[in-house]
Image: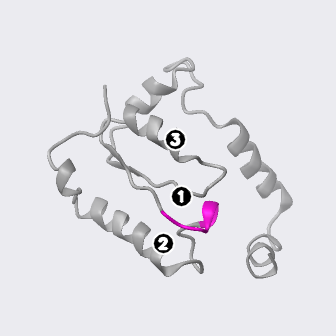
Amino acid sequence: MVRYWERTFEGRDANDLLAQLATWQHADISDNESFRGDLSRALGAIRARTVVMPCRTDQYFLVADSEREVQSIKDAELRVIESDWGHRAGTAGTDPVDIAFVDRAITDVLEDRRPRALQGVSVGTQ
């Protein structure tokens, strides 16, 4: 906690952290006039290539939720991080294997590489 939490948040304005927490609690891409609460439609409007990478042990963002979300995004794939680091998986200073996994996904998107099984196939649904 001292090494990460204090170093990361100690010098920040407390209102910034409160705003971040409010975003987590209330952010909803479907809460607007265009989508009227229809999360599946809002996700379906995403046009960017998307790689969703939850960690198997994350208790905030569950793999099952990500699996459902990926089904609605037209060009999305799910890559589950198998790690003991939970919500912190892939964060700088944690497990180098996790970080390499995230880096590989970023490189694949930037170089427009997809896993062989997904080449030429849209993973999400309409």
CB-based contact (under 8 Å), mark 1 and mark 2 = yes
- Amino acid type at image mark 3: Ala
Q: Residues within 10 Å of mark 2 (few under 14, many from 20)?
A: many
The x, y position of residue 82, in whole percent, is: 49, 63
Please say whether residue 45 is visible from this viewpoint: no
Instruction: Quickly name the residue at label 3.
Output: 64
Instruction: Quickly name the residue at label 2.
Output: 98
Q: CA distance from mark 1 to mark 2?
A: 9 Å
Query: Which numbered mark, 3 or 2, is in the foreground of this view?
Result: 3
Q: What residue is shown at x 66% (from left), y 50% (from top)?
A: 60
In which image quadrant can residue 3 be found?
bottom right
Q: Is residue 19 above or below residue 83?
A: above
| Left or right of residue 84: residue 6 | right
Q: Residues within 10 Å of mark 1 (few under 14, many from 20)?
A: many
Q: CA distance from mark 3 to mark 2?
A: 20 Å
Q: Residues within 10 Å of mark 3 (few under 14, many from 20)?
A: few
Q: Quadrant of the C terminus?
A: top left
| Left or right of residue 48: residue 59 | right
Residue closest to the far left:
120
Q: Secondary structure at mark 2?
A: helix
The x, y position of residue 102, in whole percent, is: 43, 67
Indicate which disc, 1 or 2, sits on the residue closer to the N terminus. 1
Q: What residue is shown at x 31% (from left), y 29% (from top)?
A: 125
In which image quadrant can residue 83 be found?
bottom right
Tell me if residue 87 is in the magenta stretch: yes
Magenta stretch?
82-88
Q: What residue is shown at x 75% (from left), y 43% (from top)?
A: 22
Q: CA distance from mark 3 to mark 1?
A: 11 Å
Instruction: Quickly name the residue at label 1.
Output: 55
Indicate which disc, 3 or 1, sits on the residue closer to the N terminus. 1
- Amino acid type at image mark 2: Asp
The x, y position of residue 61, in whole percent, is: 60, 48
